[in-house]
Amino acid sequence: GTLPWQGIKANTKQEKYHKIMEKKMSTPVEVLCKGYPSEFATYLHYCRSLRFEDRPDYAYLKRLFRDLYIKEGYDDSDREFDWTVKLSSRSLGPPSSRAQHVLLSQDTRTRGKRETDRPVAARSGDRERGIHFSNGNVGNPSMATNPGGLS
């Protein structure tokens, strides 16, 4: 899909960011969530109602989407999600925990960046060791213990 603020043009970056901000603030939640379950609009209304110093009710928000997940009939027994890293059979062996999968992915630090904008973390030999991410990148085994990849 597309978002109403995609493709906005301006003469300077500052002007562009200002126009994007104005568009985001003026776009009704119902427009953003058209065609999606009502829980998404509920979530955005809730978030927009928070003041800076408010602490979100994370249990409520988690329950909101957990109930939707169940209502839609999704099965999470396999515990595989879009962001789950898939290791090849030649990798380091079975992961010691699900957390290792998440640590290897680095998705939280690179989300929103184009693939070509991401820093290269792979070193020579990683491909041969079989550490492959589901997005096609090759990973560094030290990333599980050294997420920044710095020695």
Image (cartoon, rainbow, N blue to C red):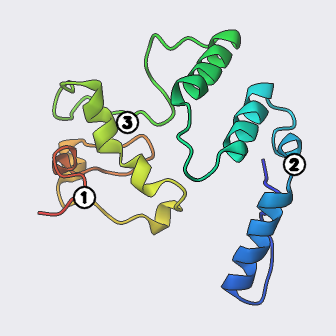
- Left or right: where does residue 12 sit relative to residue 28? left
Q: Is residue 142 above or below residue 35?
A: below
The residue depicted at 70 percent of the width and 10 percent of the height is 71
Residue 94 on image: x %, y % = 20, 24
Q: Is residue 97 above or below residue 144?
A: above
Numbered disc 3: secondary structure? loop
Which sits earlier in the primary sequence, circle 2 or circle 3? 2
- Left or right: where does residue 1 sit relative to residue 30? left
Mark 2 and mark 3 in contact? Answer it, CB < 8 Å. Answer: no
Residue 147 on image: x %, y % = 24, 52
Residue 28 numbered tag = 2
The residue depicted at 55 percent of the width and 11 percent of the height is 75
Crowdedness of circle 2 by 10 Å Cα count: few (<14), some, many (20+)? few
At label 1, the amino acid type is Gly
Marks 2/3: CA–CA distance: 35 Å
Residue 37 on image: x %, y % = 79, 26
> Which quarter of the rendering shows the C terminus?
bottom left
Q: Which residue is mark 1?
A: 148
Residue 112 on image: x %, y % = 55, 57
Marks 3/1: CA–CA distance: 17 Å
Q: Which residue is mark 3?
A: 85
Which sits earlier in the primary sequence, circle 2 or circle 1? 2
Numbered disc 1: secondary structure? loop
Asked whether 90 or 36 is in front, the reply is: 36
- Inspect this view and state whether residue 88 appears: no
Mark 2 and mark 1 in contact? Answer it, CB < 8 Å. Answer: no
Numbered disc 2: secondary structure? loop
Crowdedness of circle 3 by 10 Å Cα count: few (<14), some, many (20+)? many
Marks 2/1: CA–CA distance: 39 Å
Which sits earlier in the primary sequence, circle 3 or circle 1? 3
